[in-house]
Amino acid sequence: YGHIEGLIFIICSYFYTLKNKKYFAVFAPFLRGLQYFFLVAGIMGYESRLAWTSLILLVIRNFFGDLRDVTKDRKEGMKTLPMIMGFKRDSKSIHLVFMLITTFVWFSFTNLNVWLLVPIFLVQILTYRLTPR
């Protein structure tokens, strides 16, 4: 494992950087999911529950990220999946909620103490508006 998966990760990463191009935006959630699927699969194998979890959660998380930015994307002329599906307005809170849910799922793969979830969630909530959209 590792060589082909690393190359596919790099290719998906490159195409993900094109998401600001009009027609690449629709594929962005899938490209992000595939990036990390192949990264984890290259380390742990294709049977890895973590690889498949990465793929599914990152596709959904990036979809909600696009849902958060519908108004901005419309102004910029981008064609994201939520816009193609007919969403007209942003949904800021649903992305934050799903981000916390995915953090909990990732956390379940660790051996960290559960009390660390509180400060982790607080950091995510308090810094959420600091990341550029």
Image (cartoon, grey):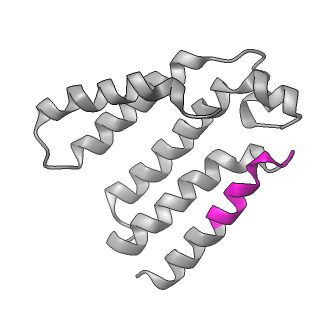
Q: Please state the horizontal and vertical placement of residue 83, each as a whole percent of the image.
A: 79, 28
Left or right: 71 with respect to 60?
right
Residue at 23 percent of width and 42 percent of height: 108
Residue 73 in the image: x percent, y percent?
79, 31
Q: Residue at x 63, y 55 (%)?
A: 31
- The vertical placement of 12 against 132, above or below, is below
Question: Which residue is at a point 60% across and 71% down the rendered structure image?
Answer: 10
Q: Nearer the viewer, residue 70 or 53?
A: 70
Magenta span has 21? yes
Q: Position of residue 60 (x, y in %)?
A: 54, 38
Please give the name of the residue rendered at 33% of the width and 63% of the height, measured from the top-left corner.
48
Reply yes or no: does residue 11 show up in magenta.
no
Drawn side of residue 69 relative to residue 77, left or right: left
How many numbered marks does the figure carry? 0
Q: Is residue 128 left or right of residue 102?
A: right
Q: Please tell me whether residue 11 is drawn above or below residue 104 in the rendered image.
A: below
In the rendered image, the quadrant that contains the C terminus is top right
Foreground residue, 39 or 133? 133
Q: Looking at the image, is 65 positioned above or below residue 20?
A: above
Closer to us: 89 or 57: 89
83 horizontally vs 96: left or right: right
Q: Residue 78 occupies which quadrant of the picture?
A: top right
Q: Which residues are magenta?
A: 12-22
In percent of width and height, residue 93 lies at 52, 16
